[in-house]
Image: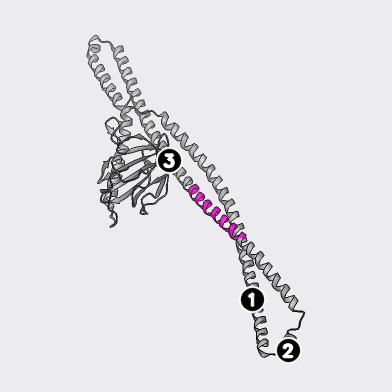
């Protein structure tokens, strides 16, 4: 029973008792009059109780919706942390592979240098059986003496160069080996952090599921559901109007007017609700709802600037991109947002991850395109 039904019932009952009162007084039936008053008092108490229940229900629902926001933001933070860890893991694993290859090449170089030095040492030992001075004195001609000196100088320089190169290889090998071990330890630390974040994500998702179950038990009438959706849509419109009022368009943002049927969809998936179809009562869908796997990347349809990146009632974690000349694109119900307000984004750049924030029943993306506040059919813009 809605509040309006209760009030109407109260009025009808008051009229009924007012109409019957003169007859009761004319009959002099005081007991009947007392009974009528008692009944009226009971009805009034019942109405007051019903109004109190309605107030308590609305208060409880408001509290649960606030809890849903808290749950969504907790999941977003943990998911973003996991996403960053996965990126670091990929970089670290790549470093480990590169360092392993470099370490292997340095070991091969070290072995070749060891063999060359060993050969030179054997040669030096063999020639060392003869006295260097004797070799010079035994030369009959000065040209041969000069040639012998030059030969020994060349041998010594080559030997010194190889020794220095060998020392550099050893030092580099030690540095690479140390870095390799550091990256392996870093990799393990990242894996431990990822495991911890995965546990946090499970807890946050369980909390969110519990909140949604409590919300689902509070059934809304068709009119209440319509009013709720209308209020959420109006809230979005007000937010977009405020954003439009403070936009300082960038010179190189040219809008979407020349891009009809040329843009890519922000995510691949099945369309659950199409633009213009009935949503609730007289309300229609101002965009499209696309089903997609959770954590899949959401990509911006065109370059622009992030105008909004936060949680909004009814839409969950929401990103709004300004494309210039009054054109905006809107991406709602994300699991986490990858861009902040003011950041520049390029066509096809990941801006969020698919989720079901804001109370969406299954993972997906709600997507809109607007021009000067008016919703446009995305199908006419995305191929």
Q: Position of residue 200 (x, y in %)?
A: 52, 43
Between 107 and 364, the one nearer to me in the picture: 107
Q: In this view, does 217 lie to the left or right of 382?
A: right
Quadrant where the C terminus sits is top left
The residue that disc 3 covers is: 355
Question: Mark 1 or mark 3, which is nearer to you?
Answer: 1
Q: Tag 2 or tag 3, which sits nearer the N-term?
A: 2
Residue at 69% x, 73% y is 120
Where disc 3 sits, the SS reads loop
381 up-or-down from 248: above or below: above
Q: Which residues, given as a range, are shown in magenta?
A: 81-104
**Pointers 1 and 3 in contact (CB under 8 A)?**
no
Residue beneath disc 2: 137
| 350 horizontally vs 154: left or right | left
> Which of the 4 image quadrants contains residue 174?
bottom right
The CA distance from mark 1 to mark 3 is 66 Å
């Amino acid at each position: 029973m809605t509040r309006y039904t209760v009030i109407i019932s109260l009025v009808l009952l008051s009229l009924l008792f007012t109409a019957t009162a003169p007859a009761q007084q004319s009959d002099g039936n005081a007991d009947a009059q007392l009974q009528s008053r008692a009944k009226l008092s009971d009805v009034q108490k019942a109405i007051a109780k019903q109004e109190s229940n309605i107030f308590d229900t609305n208060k409880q629902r408001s509290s649960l919706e606030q809890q849903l926001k808290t749950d969504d933001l907790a999941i977003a933070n943990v998911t973003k942390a996991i996403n960053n860890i996965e990126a670091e893991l990929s970089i670290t694993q790549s470093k480990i592979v590169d360092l392993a290859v470099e370490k292997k090449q340095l070991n091969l170089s070290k072995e070749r240098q060891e063999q060359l030095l060993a050969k030179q040492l054997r040669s030096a030992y063999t020639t060392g059986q003869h006295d260097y001075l004797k070799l010079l004195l035994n030369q009959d001609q000065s040209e041969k003496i000069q040639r012998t000196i030059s030969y020994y100088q060349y041998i010594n320089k080559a030997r010194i160069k190889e020794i220095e190169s060998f020392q550099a290889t050893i030092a580099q090998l030690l540095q690479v080996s140390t870095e390799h071990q550091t990256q392996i330890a870093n990799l393990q630390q990242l894996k431990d952090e990822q495991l911890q974040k995965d546990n946090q994500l499970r807890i946050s998702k369980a909390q969110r599921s519990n909140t949604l179950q409590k919300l689902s038990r509070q059934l809304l009438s068709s009119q209440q559901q319509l009013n709720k959706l209308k209020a959420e849509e109006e809230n979005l419109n007000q937010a977009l109007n405020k954003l439009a009022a403070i936009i300082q368009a960038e010179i190189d943002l040219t809008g979407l007017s020349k891009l009809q049927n040329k843009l890519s969809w922000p995510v691949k998936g099945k369309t659950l609700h199409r633009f213009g179809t009935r949503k609730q009562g007289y309300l229609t869908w101002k965009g499209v709802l696309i089903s997609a796997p959770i954590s899949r990347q959401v990509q911006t349809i065109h370059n622009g600037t992030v105008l909004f990146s936060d949680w909004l009632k009814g839409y969950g974690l929401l990103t709004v991109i300004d494309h210039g000349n009054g054109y905006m694109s809107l991406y709602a119900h994300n699991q986490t947002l990858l861009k902040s307000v003011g950041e520049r984004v390029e066509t096809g750049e990941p801006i969020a991850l698919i989720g079901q924030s804001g109370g969406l029943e299954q993972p997906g993306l709600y997507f809109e395109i607007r021009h000067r506040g008016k919703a446009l059919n995305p199908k006419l813009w995305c191929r």
